[in-house]
Image (tube, helix red, strand yellow):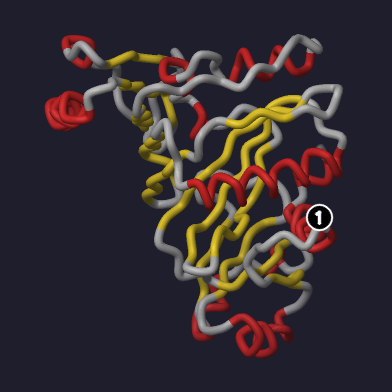
Amino acid sequence: FPIIADRLTQKQLFDKLHLPTAPWQLLADRSEWPAVFDRLGELAIVKRRTGGYDGRGQWRLRANETEQLPAECYGECIVEQGINFSGEVSLVGARGFDGSTVFYPLTHNLHQDGILRTSVAFPQANAQQQAQAEEMLSAIMQELGYVGVMAMECFVTPQGLLINELAPRVHNSGHWTQNGASISQFELHLRAITDLPLPQPVVNNPSVMINLIGSDVNYDWLKLPLVHLHWYDKEVRPGRKVGHLNLTDSDTSRLTATLEALIPLL
């Protein structure tokens, strides 16, 4: 866990395993900025080594904006090349004590202001992307001797997938599995850590997960027949994830119609 919790050692792990990720370096001192932009290009993404989630602890900076970075970040952040990507996907998988691994189909993710808003999963993912993602996450879990569920977030680029970062746990982008797969990511994690069988999860239908962020519960959501509500019973605050909705159906037109009816209620 400590290797993955620190973005510096996480990136070093990718490099050790020769896995594709955005060009990066440790940001130790202000004086490094000219060399950083020479090496990484005009857009730099600065991330705190530890902590930070949902866009917190991250900065998108150009050469004339580096003064925005707090002084305490130097030595405690990495800086990455800003990637021109066409989409973001995540792979959720599990590894058992015997080294066996199983995976869900790739999930397509939509972020807004650094927060995951929606995830969409199809029974059949892009075969080339699925194979690449499974190979990469397998290599990571095997190298670490990891047991349990892990998620890997990737950028989609013309050259293939680039690993963004890892989450050593069940993941927000895998919540659709509660209603859209034969085994949810939560059950899969419990099976892995208790040394129970890990069959390949069966996914027959498209699924959509919508995060509920800073909104009060609205039971009108449940008037729509495809909607499953998962409410966290947290205090509602702006920007806070307080629940999610799952929808799944074999008929994509019916699924789309339900989503269109749901949008005004969100």
Residue 61 located left or right of residue 170: left
Residue 192 occupies which quadrant of the picture? Answer: top right
Residue 62 located left or right of residue 118: right
Indicate the quadrant containing the C terminus: top left, top right, bottom left or bottom right: top left
Up the image or down, 117 lies above or below 164; here it is above
Up the image or down, 140 lies above or below 92; here it is below
- Image coordinates of residue 53 in percent, x first then y, are 57, 44
The amino acid beneath tag 1 is: Leu
Instruction: Tell me what residue is drawn at x 74 percent, y 72 percent.
Output: 25
- The residue nearer to you, when weighing 41 against 215, is 41
Residue 27 occupies which quadrant of the picture? Answer: bottom right
- The residue nearer to you, when weighing 61 against 87, is 87
Instruction: Tell me what residue is drawn at x 50 percent, y 14 percent.
Output: 182
Q: Residues within 10 Å of mark 1 (few under 14, many from 20)?
A: some
Q: Name the residue under label 1.
A: 13
Instruction: Tell me what residue is drawn at x 45 percent, y 50 percent.
Output: 114
Residue 184 located left or right of residue 139: left
- Image coordinates of residue 124 in percent, x first then y, are 43, 36
- Image coordinates of residue 147 in percent, x first then y, are 80, 27
Disc tally is 1
Residue 138 located left or right of residue 46: right
Residue 212 can be seen, yes or no: no
